[in-house]
Image (cartoon, rainbow, N blue to C red):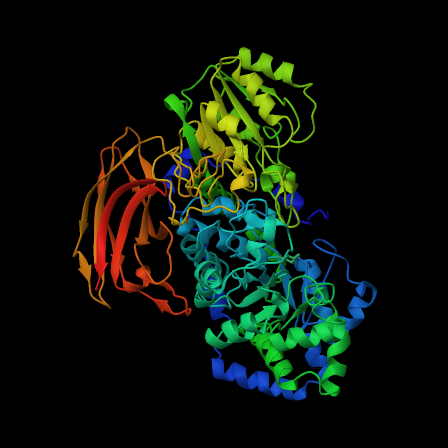
Amino acid sequence: MRVPRYHHLLLGLLLAATPAALAQKTKIKVKKAAASAASALPQVSAADIEQRITALLGQMTLEEKIGQLNQYSGREVTGPASNRKNDLLNSIRAGQVGSMLNVKGVADTRLIQAEALKSRLKIPLLFSLDVIHGYQTVFPIPLGEAASWDLAAIRESAHVAAREAAASGIHWTFAPMVDVGRDPRWGRVMEGAGEDTYLGSQIARARVLGFQGEKLGGTDAIMACAKHFAAYGAAVAGREYNVVDVSEQQLWQVYLPPFKAAADAGVATFMNSFNTLNGIPATGSRYLQRDILKGQWQYPGFVVSDWGSIGEMVPWGYATDKADAARKALAAGSDMDMESDAYHTTLAQSVKDGKADQALLDDAVRRILRKKFELGLFDDPYRFSDEKREKQVLNDPQHRVAARDIARKSVVLLKNDNHALPLAQPRSIALIGPLAKAKRDLAGSWVVLADTAQITSVHEGLTKRAGKNTQVRYAKGCEVQGDSRAGFAAAVEAAKASDVVVLCVGETWDMSGEAKSRTDIGLPGVQTELFQVLKATGKPVVVILMAGRPLVFNQIADQADAILYGWWPGSEGGHALADVLFGDYNPAGKLPSTFPRSLGQVPISYQLYNTGRPVTKPGDIRYKSAYIDSPNTPRYAFGHGLSYTSFKYDGLKLSQPTMAAGQTVQLQCTVTNTGKVAGEEVVQLYLRDLVASVARPLKELKDFQKISLKPGETKTLTFTIDQDKLAFYNAKLEWVAEPGDFQLMIGSASDDIRLESKLTLQ
Ligand code: BGC
C-alpha cells in the first residue's frame, strides 16, 4: 500500500467535531466549487461538442481509435496484473490508451497525463478509480449509508468523495454499485443499497447526483458509473462471479430499475458485469447493452467492461479466443475494455478483415470522447490536477463532520430491552471485543487511502465522550477469527468490575467485499462464546456489531440487552457510535436488508409471496409453505430499526377510495413523538396488489419519508399515489397498473405496519 504524499498534512487534523457542533449543523453542507469551477469552462453547446468529436474522429487512425477504448491499471489492486505493464508508457505516448485506473494524486496524474499529451493527437486520458465510500475521508460502507434512508446525507457523502477525488486528479469513479442484493453470502452486498428496488433506485439517484452534480464540468465533481449491468447481485448460491438465472419479470421488476434511475439522473457511464445472465455473459449481452441500455433507454454515455471481463468470455466458453471475445463485446455494446487487452491486441485486424463493424467502433470512440469534452479535458487536461486545491480540499474539516453525520445516521438500533441504551453516565464501562480498538476494520472494504491514523476507533470515541468520571476498562477477549479463548478471563474480570459491558464484535474489513463470498454468515470465531461468558456475569451487555453484510447472531439477538448494528462506519465511526451510545444522537437507522434467522433462509427479502398455501396461524405448518425447523419470518425485518423515543401513527385518510386511470390520490397520516426525547422516524409506505394478472408480493415499498419530531410533536404526512406506484411488469413485460383492489400500508418497518387502507383502481 502506498503512503499518500499528503499524509503528514493530515496528522493532527480535527479527529473530533463536538456533538454540540454537530447538533447545530443538522444539514451538513460542504462547499460547492462547482458553479465557479464550471463557469471557468468555455460554454460549449452539445452541438459544438459533436462537431469537435467528428473533426477529431476524422483525423484518427484505426489504431488511435481503438486506443481510446483501452483502459489499463496503473498498479495491481483488484485483479491480475496487466502483462503490458512494462511498455505502458510507450503505449500511452503512442495514443493507444484512453483511460487509466488506479493512478491517483495530482503529482502522478500530471506525470501520466503529460505522457498522453506527447501522443500525435494529444488526446487526454481519463483517470478512474474505485471511490466507493469516500476518498481520503472514509464514509460508512454503502450498505451502511443505505440504512440511513437519508437521501440528502447520502448525496452529500458522494459529493464529498467526489470533491476529494476530483482534487486529486481523478475524473471518474466506478460507483455507485446499484445491484440489488438479497443473498448475504455474496460479499458485495456491502457495496450496494440492500435488497429493495425502490429504496435502491432512490439511493442510486442520490449517489449519481452527489458524484456528478447536476451537470458534469465542475472541478468538484467526477463521472459516476452505474454498475454492474446487470443482475450481478443474483449470483447463484451467493458465489462471486457465478451464473445468474433470473426470469425476465424479475430482471425488469427487481434488478433493472436502479440502473434506469441512475441513467435518468444522468450517470456518465455504466459498467457491465462478470456474471452470465440466462447463459450470456453480461459483457457480451446485446440484449442488455444494445437493446435495453442504448436502445430502449437511449443512453448517451459509455459502457466500460468489468476488470478483464471481455477476456473472461473465453473461460466462460462463450468465445473461442480474445479476438472472438473482443468482437462479441464490441458488437454487444461494451465500449471500453478494462484490462483485458483484447480490443488493443485484436480489434484492428478484425476490422480490417471485415469481422468487426467500423461504425460500432466509431460510436464507442465518440461516446468516450464526448465525456472527455464534457469534463473540459480538451480545454485543460490538468483541470483536476491542481496541487494547491488538492492540499486544501483533502484537509477540509467539514468532510469529517459530514462523515460523522452519516455514520450516526447509519447505525441501526436492533434491540433495546429495558432502555439499556442510551447509557446513563455509568461509573465504569467494560469495553470488550476484537473490534473495540480496531481502526482498519472500521474503514471496511474498498478504501482508497487506508491511513488508519485517520480512523477513530470505538475505544477512542467512547473514552473521549465518557470523560474523566467514567472508568473505561478495555479487554480484547478474542480475535474476530480463530478459536483462542485465552483472553476470556481478562474480559470477564473487566465486566465484573464495571457497571455495563459494551462488546464490539463482527467481521474484519476483508471478510465482505469483492471475492468475499461466505458459506457461513454467522458471527465468526469464538465471538459468540465471548458474549456468553460476559452475559453470565449478570452485567448488562450492549453489543455493537460491525460487519459488511447481515450476519446471523441468534444468541446475541436473544440475550443481549441492546444491539447496535454499526456496519463498517468509516473515519468517524468511533465518535458516531459514542454519540449513539450516550444518546447525543438518537438512532434512526432502518435495515436496508432483511436479517435472516439462519443461512437456510437465504436468498431472502421482505417481498414474500402469499403462495397457494400460506401459514395463517403460527405453528400451523403442515402442508403449508413453511420450514419445519424455523419460522418463515426473519430475525430482523427490512425497514426495522428502533429509536430512544416512540412514535404513534394515527389519522389515516385517503383522499378518495377509488382512483380512475391517470388520477392521483393522497394518503395522509399523522405521526407523533410520544417519548421524552427528540427523534427521527422513517415512515414507510408499502402496497399490495391483491389480484393481478401475475401474482404480486405481499408488500412492496413504494415511498418513504424521514421526519424529525420533538417530544410531543405531531406531523402530518402526505403520500401521493399515482398509477406508477400501482404498476408492475406483466407477463408480456408491459409496465401496467391493472384495475382492482390495492392494500395500502403505512408502517415503521416492513413487519410493523401501523395503518392500513384499501384503494380501488377503476
Ligand atoms: C470490480 C469492479 C471494479 C473494478 C476496478 C472489478 O474487479 O468488479 O467493481 O470497479 O474491479 O477496480
Identify the residue at horizontal 37%, vertical 48% (top origin): 610
Residue 483 left/right relative to 615: right
- Depicted 177 relative to depicted 366: above or below: above
Q: Residue furthest right?
A: 86
Residue 710 can be seen, yes or no: yes
Q: Residue furthest left?
A: 656
- Depicted 543 relative to depicted 246: above or below: above
Identify the residue at horizontal 77%, vertical 62% (top origin): 82
- Tell me which corner region of the image, top left, top right, bottom left or bottom right, holds residue 269: bottom right
The location of residue 389, given as percent across then percent down, is 57, 57
- Depicted 427 relative to depicted 731: above or below: above
The C terminus appears in which quarter of the rendering? bottom left
The number of numbered badges drawn on the structure is 0
The location of residue 595, given as percent across then percent down, is 48, 39
Residue 525 left/right relative to 654: right
Q: Residue furthest front?
A: 623
Ligand 1 placement by image quarter: bottom right
The location of residue 230, given as percent across then percent down, is 55, 62
- Tell me which corner region of the image, top left, top right, bottom left or bottom right, holds residue 439: top right
Residue 554 or residue 129, whichever sits in front:
554
Residue 472 can be seen, yes or no: no
